[in-house]
């Protein structure tokens, strides 16, 4: 609903606007750009009509404010007066009015969850929704039981042994110098990508991705620990162990106190099968009502951000750079293949976030990472739009500067590669980014793979990202074919020309598909992706054989 700042992207007459079925954006009046909105919020004008007071809003009160000139909307428990924002909203007034006088969280998330509305609308904040006290009571009682060590191993084991749906739990134990937090996921497909750990001062958080949910441990530790820690996964039993090093070798009486949303199972955004997600949560609620805090609203917990340092920046094409960021020592985060994160920067006092898909540092195995412990680096291939909002600011960062990086999101699953024989990749522009890790993974980790074909659409030769690496890789590995298609070649070009089309696709996909297991991945400007999916369906590819990358 509240679209991010890139309100005018794509440009008014760009093909990207012509997409059918896409979210429509309305032309904004003169003086109603994001920058104008930021200026208004900083002008000191009373935008809520409450003269700076924050109030507690009941449902009845919220319902009354349902008109354009008096429009309140609740997002994640906070109520905003969005009337002053109406004319600045890229999605138009009608879109905003759909949530007038009600809880707009779901509607908001259907469009763009990453929009930093807290920052954009902070001057419009009216107050919080009135909270139901019963929830808080349960929370504290249950947490006391868990964190003082009264939920011992025997009980966890007992729970795990029970028949029925799986649900996570945790436990902790200690030696003289170490504290181990064990998470029992009861899922076999858990790996080091499934767990994200951050700790800062005494605050410890671990997010475990379990199917389409996130299990959060969030604790204020009772004693200090060192910055570095280790994470182990025992795949066969779905157990994760996080081993923290005590600062002092004393015995801890209890692990710590619960922080916000501790011990919650939270539905993840961007999941493949909403029904499965729902039923998983429902089953767990029924089975484990007494020890779980279930967050029904998936967004009570937003994405968590940690500050990462810019280590290097390298020109890849005239407008695309390879950025290398370093995670803090107190973070464990590995972005799964095909998933993206959000980068956050303050821009003229407002925090702006945009999604980006991490890549490997190179397509070639001889590439050497800077010498530091494994998995401490995240690489991004990012195109700088000189008239864009976010990327020029990113480009201005100096080595050593910081940028916030969110936890990952996305619905791509590597289980799609199981027994895969033929893989087709269709990429346009920076839509190449998810293909990088997919290519690396497919060519090294899928024994059944017979053929990988990449068709890469760009405007000109100068726009092709990692052209020589792709050519070298295709030369080294005969399973890989790469074809470049240009829409606006400047100099003489002997290769393919044009846009994605039935003719190009049917030739590209010509392979003996009869008995093979096949996957087609597609990513690029939204209309490109949408058109590609339609063409693939016309060519009789099934839903399971197509994966399109979109936000
Ligand atoms: P914007 O402000 O969004 O502007 C983009 C373009 O629109 C510019 O050319 C700008 O001049 C033009 N424009 C803006 N306003 C107007 C106007 N009023 N009139 C005419 N033209 C206008 N990008 C990458 O480079 N690498 C990635 O790995 C990557 N991963 C992504 C993953 C996902 C899931 C998604 C959804 C997107 C991804 N993107 C990626 C795109 C990225 O999120 C941003 O959209 C992109 O970087 C543009 O950001 P910006 O704020 O700089 O530009
Ligand atoms: P670009 O350079 O503008 O375009 C790349 C190629 O795609 C060009 O040949 C272009 O042709 C063609 N193209 C553009 N719009 C088209 C359309 N409607 N139909 C058919 N072909 C079209 O691309 P870019 O600036 O790098 O943008 C990449 C896009 O990918 C962004 O929108 C970004 O958000 C998206 N992206 C998404 C993800 C994800 O969802 N996971 C990840 C990365 C990037 P023309 O010469 O005619 O323009």
Image (cartoon, rainbow, N blue to C red):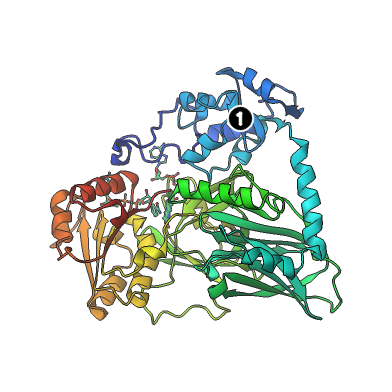
Residue positioned 42% across, 37% down in the render: 8
Q: Report crowding for label 1: few under 14, some 14 to 19, many 20 or more residues within 10 A (C-alpha).
A: some
Local SS, label 1: helix
Q: In which quadrant of the rendered view does residue 206 lie?
A: bottom right
Q: Nearer the viewer, residue 233 or 301?
A: 233
Q: Is residue 84 visible?
A: yes
Q: Determine which residue is flagged by label 1.
A: 40
Q: Nearer the viewer, residue 314 or 1?
A: 1
Residue 147 horizontal/vertical position (percent): 79, 61
Residue 255 horizontal/vertical position (percent): 80, 65
Q: Is mark 1 within 8 Å of ligand 1?
A: no
Q: In which quadrant of the rendered view does residue 101 lie?
A: top right
Residue positioned 69% across, 51% down in the render: 261
Q: Is residue 316 visible?
A: no
Q: Nearer the viewer, residue 314 or 28?
A: 28
Residue positioned 29% across, 36% down in the render: 18
**Is 4 rendered above or below residue 193?**
above
Left or right, 93 with reference to 441 = right
Report the number of discs. Answer: 1
Residue positioned 57% across, 52% down in the render: 344
Q: Nearer the viewer, residue 200 or 419?
A: 419
**Is 338 rendered above or below residue 451?**
above
Residue 118 horizontal/vertical position (percent): 63, 40
Q: In which quadrant of the rendered view does residue 259 lie?
A: bottom right
Residue 58 horizontal/vertical position (percent): 71, 25
> In the current view of this chain or complex, which residue is farthest to the front?
163
Left or right, 24 with reference to 175 = left
């Amino acid at each position: 609903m509240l679209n991010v700042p890139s309100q005018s992207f794509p440009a008014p007459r760009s093909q990207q606007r012509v997409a059918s079925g896409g979210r429509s954006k309305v032309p904004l009046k003169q003086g109603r750009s994001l920058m104008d909105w930021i200026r208004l919020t900083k002008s000191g004008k009373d935008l809520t009509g409450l003269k700076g007071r924050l109030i507690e809003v009941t449902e009845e009160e919220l319902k009354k404010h349902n008109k354009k000139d008096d429009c309140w909307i609740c997002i994640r428990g906070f109520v905003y007066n969005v009337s002053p924002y109406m004319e600045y909203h890229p999605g138009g007034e009608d879109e905003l009015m759909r949530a007038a006088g009600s809880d707009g969280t779901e509607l908001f998330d259907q469009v763009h969850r990453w929009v930093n509305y807290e920052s954009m609308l902070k001057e419009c904040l009216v107050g919080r929704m009135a909270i139901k006290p019963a929830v808080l009571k349960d929370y504290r009682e249950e947490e006391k039981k868990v964190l003082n060590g009264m939920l011992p191993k025997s009980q966890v084991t007992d729970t795990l042994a029970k028949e029925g749906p799986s649900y996570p739990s945790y436990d902790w134990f200690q030696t003289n110098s170490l504290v181990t937090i064990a998470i029992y996921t009861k899922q076999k497909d858990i790996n080091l990508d499934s767990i994200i750990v951050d700790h800062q001062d005494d605050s410890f958080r671990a997010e475990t991705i379990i199917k389409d949910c996130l299990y959060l441990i969030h604790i204020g530790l009772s004693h200090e620990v060192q910055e570095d820690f280790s994470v182990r996964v025992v795949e066969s039993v779905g157990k994760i162990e996080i081993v923290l090093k005590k600062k002092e070798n004393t015995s801890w009486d209890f692990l710590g106190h619960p922080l916000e949303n501790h011990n919650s199972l939270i539905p993840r955004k961007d999941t493949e099968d909403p029904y499965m997600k729902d039923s998983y949560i429902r089953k767990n609620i029924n089975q484990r009502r007494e020890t779980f805090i279930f967050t029904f609203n998936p967004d009570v917990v937003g994405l968590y951000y940690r500050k990462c340092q810019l280590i290097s920046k390298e020109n890849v094409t005239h407008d695309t750079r390879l950025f290398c960021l370093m995670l803090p020592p107190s973070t464990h985060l590995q972005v799964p293949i095909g998933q993206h994160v959000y980068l956050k920067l303050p821009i003229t006092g407002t925090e702006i976030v945009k999604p980006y898909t991490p890549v490997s540092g190179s397509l070639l195995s001889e590439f050497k990472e800077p010498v530091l412990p494994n998995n401490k680096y995240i690489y991004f291939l990012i195109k700088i739009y000189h008239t864009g909002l976010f990327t020029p600011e990113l480009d201005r960062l100096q080595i050593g500067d910081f940028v916030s990086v969110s936890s990952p999101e996305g619905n791509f699953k590597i289980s799609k590669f199981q027994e895969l024989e033929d893989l087709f990749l269709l990429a346009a522009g920076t839509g190449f980014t998810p293909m990088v890790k997919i290519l690396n993974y497919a060519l090294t980790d899928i024994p059944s793979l017979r053929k990988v074909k990449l068709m890469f659409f760009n405007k000109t030769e100068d726009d092709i990202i990692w052209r020589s690496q792709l050519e070298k890789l295709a030369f080294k590995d005969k399973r890989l074919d790469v074809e470049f298609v240009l829409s606006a070649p400047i100099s003489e070009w002997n290769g393919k020309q044009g846009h994605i089309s039935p003719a190009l696709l049917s030739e590209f996909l010509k392979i003996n598909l009869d008995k093979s297991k096949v996957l087609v991945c597609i990513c690029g400007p939204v209309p490109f992706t949408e058109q590609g999916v339609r063409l693939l369906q016309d060519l009789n590819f099934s839903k399971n054989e197509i994966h399109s990358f979109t936000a």
